Each structure stands twice: as structure tokens, then as C-alpha cells.
Image: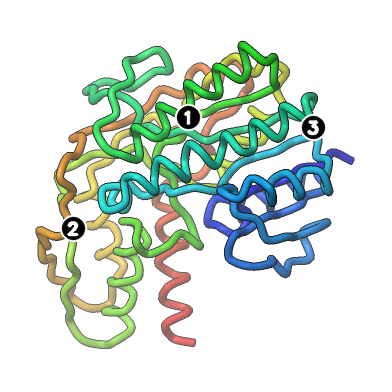
Amino acid sequence: MKKALVFGAGGFAGGHLVNELVSNNYEVYGCSRYGKITDKRYAGAMVCDIMDVDRVKTVIAEVNPDYIINMAGISSVGLSWKIPQTTIDVNVVGPVNILETVKETNPDAHILFIGSSEEYAPKAEPISEVDRLDANNPYGISKVMLERLVSLYRDHYGMHVHYVRAFNHTGIGQADTFVVPSWCKQVAEISVSGKPGTIRVGNLNVARDFSDVRDVVRAYRMVLESDDCSQIYNICSGKAIYLEKILEFITSMSEQPVEIEVNQKLIRPVENDTIFGDHSKITKDLGWEPEIDLKDTIREMYEDFVSRKRS
């Protein structure tokens, strides 16, 4: 059985990745910095902060994995503006701790690191993997730095290091500090309350490329299993949707009227107007393409919040 070690397994995408790996006959070991994970899906679970290089070494030595996936890190653009130095430390130095350990102890292991659409320069057309990188926020810059390090360790040290650039993804379990679950939660609370209410939003006049997290982690697994680690792949839906349209769909499910209030504190200092990707490369090379309709994803999220509010 293939043995996989997931750093950041306790997070949103990390948890969904574990489901994907287990359903494809992986023996999964999960790490979380917040405490030991108690979950029957795991062959083993442990506490590990990727900033603690000694702990990283211990965990990798104990598990001796065939595959390593790093899902740990700061993933919020908004948060990265508030803590830029910490963002760089966690998203760059933490992965280097993993790379250095694997280089010395597990050189045959395959490793996957997750980049972001925030690495790219703004573009009105679908963004491909060869388009210019020009990150304009601390989070995006940290990912550009990570990608260059991945290339160095792969090309210079001959390591099996894979890299993808993931565009926006969402689903059940995502923190309500992110836009789609935030709106689903607020509107669900209004609907269940039995009276009209107001939700507070940021800039609605931006378009983003959203995928279901389950499609995204399926792509991660397929990339990890591929023989050619020299290729970088976009993981995206290939469609741009304005946040205003997403909000309209969410509010349409409410049983109560919802008033929209723009909160200036929720608007980022710098923001790209439109970001959407081209997934033709991974579709051609690995046969991956998105399968789950975004409306179905959002409906599931909204209904989950309604159910929890009523319970």
C-alpha cells in the first residue's frame, strides 16, 4: 500500500485530500500543528509545526513516506497583508524544512507543494502556466518564492518535487473568513432567524475562478502520482464568475429578505479585477477536469450552515 504523509491535514483542503487519498488505497499519516488528529481514516496522526525543523525530521523518519503533501501554510490573501513576515516564514521557510529533510533522508519520496493563482500578473483572458508571474500581495509573493525553491531542489538536487498553482476553491468545511462560506453562513443565519437581515461584504466587482475542493484534491493526487515532476499545472475551473453573481445565488436561497451592505474594512488594499485559469495542460497530460458544478457546491455549503443553525 502507498504511504502518504500530509502536513496540514487538519485544515480545510487537507481534510478533503485525506478523503481522496484513503479512497484511492493510500495509507495516510496526518500532521496538524493544532493538536493530534483523532480520525479513523488515518494510519497515524501526530502534532507537527512545519516551522519546527527537528519535529519535521522526527515525523518523516517515523513515517518514512512514499509521498509527502504539504497543505500547511497561510492561505488567506487578506491575512497576509496583516502579517506579511509570518506569511513568508510559514509559506517559504516551512517548506524548506521539509525539502531539506527529504533531501537528506528520503530522496526517493515524491513531494507536492501547492502554489496559487495569486502568483500571476492580472490578465483578462484565461491564464496559462506560461503566463507572467507578478504577484501583488504578500501571499502571492510567498508562493512565487516557493515555486523557485521547488525548481531549485528538483533541478539541482534531483528531487521528485511537484508543484501546482491552485485557483480559488471552496466547499463544506472552509473557514468563514473566506468569502463564499462567510456569505453562506450569514445568509443562512438570516433565513433561519425568521426575519430580514443585513450581510456585510467587500468588493463585489471582481471575478474569480472557483472550483469544488473535491475536484481540486483529486487533481493533487493525480499530479502526485505522475512520473514527470518537471511540469507545473493550473488547477482551476476555466471560468470567471463575479462575486456579485455568487452573492445573488446565495441570497436567492434565503427564506427572508437580505440587505447588502458594503464594508470598506473588507476591501483589500490591492486586488486583481479578474483572475481565471486555463486547465487544458493538466487535462491533456493527466486527464483531469472539473466535474462538480459550482452551484451544487454552494448549495451544499448553504444547506450545511442552515442545518447546523437549526440543530
Residue type at mark 2 is Leu
Q: Earlier in the sequence, mark 3 or mark 1?
A: 3
Relative horizontal placement of residue 46, taking residue 189 as reference (left or right): right
Residue type at mark 1 is Leu
Could you tell me how far apart the alpha carbons at marks 2 and 3 are, in whole angstroms? 45 Å
Task: Provide residue 218's location: percent of width, then percent of height.
Answer: 62, 39
Measuring 68% from the left and 30% from the top, which residue is drawn there?
224
Q: Give the residue pinned by disc 2.
A: 266
Residue 241 lies, with reference to residue 141, above or below; the image says below
Which quadrant would the N terminus be assigned to in this image? Answer: top right
Q: Nearer the viewer, residue 96 or 7?
A: 96
Q: Nearer the viewer, residue 245 or 105?
A: 105
- Crowd rating for badge 1 (residues with CA inside 10 Å; few <14, some 14–19, many 20+): many
Measuring 73% from the left and 60% from the top, which residue is drawn there?
46
Q: Give the residue pinned by disc 3.
A: 105
Query: Is there any visible trace of residue 25 in the rendered image?
Result: no
Q: Give the residue pinned by disc 1.
A: 146
- Crowd rating for badge 3 (residues with CA inside 10 Å; few <14, some 14–19, many 20+): few
Q: Earlier in the sequence, mark 2 or mark 1?
A: 1
Could you tell me how far apart the alpha carbons at marks 2 and 1 are, in whole angstroms? 27 Å
Task: Provide residue 120's location: percent of width, then percent of height.
Answer: 32, 25
Residue type at mark 3 is Thr
The quarter holding residue 110 reads top right
Task: Provide residue 4's location: percent of width, then percent of height.
Answer: 76, 42
Residue 102 lies, with reference to residue 130, above or below; the image says below
Q: Residue furthest front?
A: 54
Task: Provide residue 311's location: percent of width, then percent of height.
Answer: 49, 87
Camera-near label (2 vs 3) is 3
- Asked if the residue under mark 1 is in contact with the one under mark 2, i.e. CB atoms within 8 Å, the reply is no
